[in-house]
Amino acid sequence: MPISGRPAGDPQACENCPIRHRAVCAHCESDELEVLEGMKSYKTYAPGEPVVWAGDPMPHVASVVNGVASISRTMEDGRRQMVGLLLPSDFLGRPGRSQAAFDVTAATELTVCRFERKPFEKLLETTPSISRRLLEMTLDELDAAREWMVLLGRKTAREKIASLLVILARREISLRPGVVPGRLSFDLMITREAMADYLGLTIETVSRQITALRKDGVIELGTKRQITVPDFSRLMDEAGDDSDGDHIA
Amino acid sequence: MPISGRPAGDPQACENCPIRHRAVCAHCESDELEVLEGMKSYKTYAPGEPVVWAGDPMPHVASVVNGVASISRTMEDGRRQMVGLLLPSDFLGRPGRSQAAFDVTAATELTVCRFERKPFEKLLETTPSISRRLLEMTLDELDAAREWMVLLGRKTAREKIASLLVILARREISLRPGVVPGRLSFDLMITREAMADYLGLTIETVSRQITALRKDGVIELGTKRQITVPDFSRLMDEAGDDSDGDHIA
DNA sequence: CGTGAGTTTGAGTGCGCTCAAGCTTAGTGG
DNA sequence: CCACTAAGCTTGAGCGCACTCAAACTCACG
């Protein structure tokens, strides 16, 4: 693989990368990008395919380029809790640790941009723009994890469902700028089972609470995966968070 | 305040600092320490005193020098969830954010070593040894938060109590090297209410489960705050984690 | 002693779980 | 074109764990 001089328009060139400005390499200068270019390799996973199991050796770290992966832990008796979601530009793996702490599974078709862990760790020590960006991203994930702890520890089933819908609706808003939050539709890309694993509920409870929110007019259902929110502030009230804006910028 | 040349034995000099080798400044060289020395100021809080409220401006970041602080969120109706515990050497505050995302409260008498946020952010950009150390610490906290999500989402009340006791016992072991985990005693430094807020339970349930573990011989109680664990592996079984070792190194 | 914070214990309730059946939808092959 | 299947989802009945409300106990401190 060439260190530099990829053909213009090469879809695997860093300069054409869809996550160029948001991933761990976001702050890199072109000379730093060249080093990464020489280290990286792509890998693709099928939906449902495991990426790593907790306890497995982790010879690589990676950035998610396309698709969604879930981070979860399964207890011996089968109870499962999702603890994170990896979206495009998110970082997978942990510098300084050789074993995975959690299971990672491709939720959709997934493409990642991999680096061998040891060389990447070296690079972190010599390239402040990478370690600073990784710090920013890790701090964001920590805040998100703590918000989720509040949900898991203290919210009712109805509030949990509403909170998840708020998050999904927010992402929809951020992807489609200019849509005023009056009436809003979006797809649930995940199964009831994934929702249950994420929220610390059973699929039956998820189903019942979605039905209840529909009967109360908080949401409307097209197909089972198509949600319409007629009044976004009503949904936010149901989520149980402080009403006046987010703590998270 | 002198930039350098503190008197030898000065208890506030970085070289005498009890968290010198573990805090955000752990990797600093002596010239970097001098810069920090000129920026820092100590502040002490009484037990129960708030450090910041969620939403407050955060003009400082800080390292915990002595004592314990809790990070928590309180919902409008009073439900509270603790989302982190700050022990000596832990870092308080978030570079790049001007508003606190969570409440921070001194659990015991608390001494912190503060830096103004803006100058500290500048320092992060120019001092890789600090940003790398902060990255390590943040990654550790993220893993801890995710472990805690499993506890909050999927564990029973008995497993939650046992898990907390395992964590506290582990810390006791790490502080007293050489103590073989046969029989082990330690103090609960926190009230039942703090345990409940941490575990996502009520104080009554905490109390009942501690009683149940005592009746089943898993733990013994001296005073209400003094715990003895006759068989550590028995306690670990009760915690419901994978039996064969930790994922966390 | 009296006070108050922290803790324990008891009685009863209800939310979310378990177990079980039925429904919907999409895909497959006769 | 219509079984047939399987995965995903919904609905129902009943139960149990953890919560709520209430009272009593412990212990440090004035």
Image (cartoon, coloured by chain):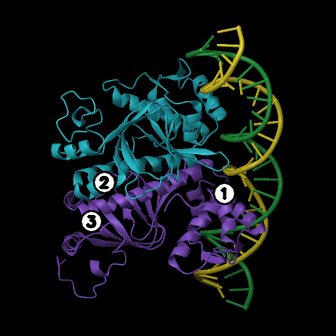
Chain colours: A purple, B cyan, C yellow, D green
Please give the label number shown on residue A159: 1
Tag 3 residue: A115
- Which kind of residue does numbered mark 3 sit on? Phe
User: Does dot 1 land on a helix, a strand or a loop?
Assistant: helix
Front position among marks 3 and 1: 1
Task: Judge whether A116 appears above or below B23 on screen.
Answer: below
Query: Dot 2, crowdedness within 10 Å: few (<14), some or many (≥20)?
Result: few
Q: Is residue B246 above or below residue A249?
A: above
Residue B41, x across and y down, in percent: 33, 40
The percent position of residue A141, horizontal first and vertical second, equals 43, 58
On the same chain: label 3 and label 2? Answer: no
**Mark pair 3, 2: CA separation:** 33 Å
Residue at 62% across, 75% down: A181
Kind of element beneath mark 3: strand
Residue at label 2? B119
Asked if residue A154 is positioned above or below residue A212 in the image, the reply reads above
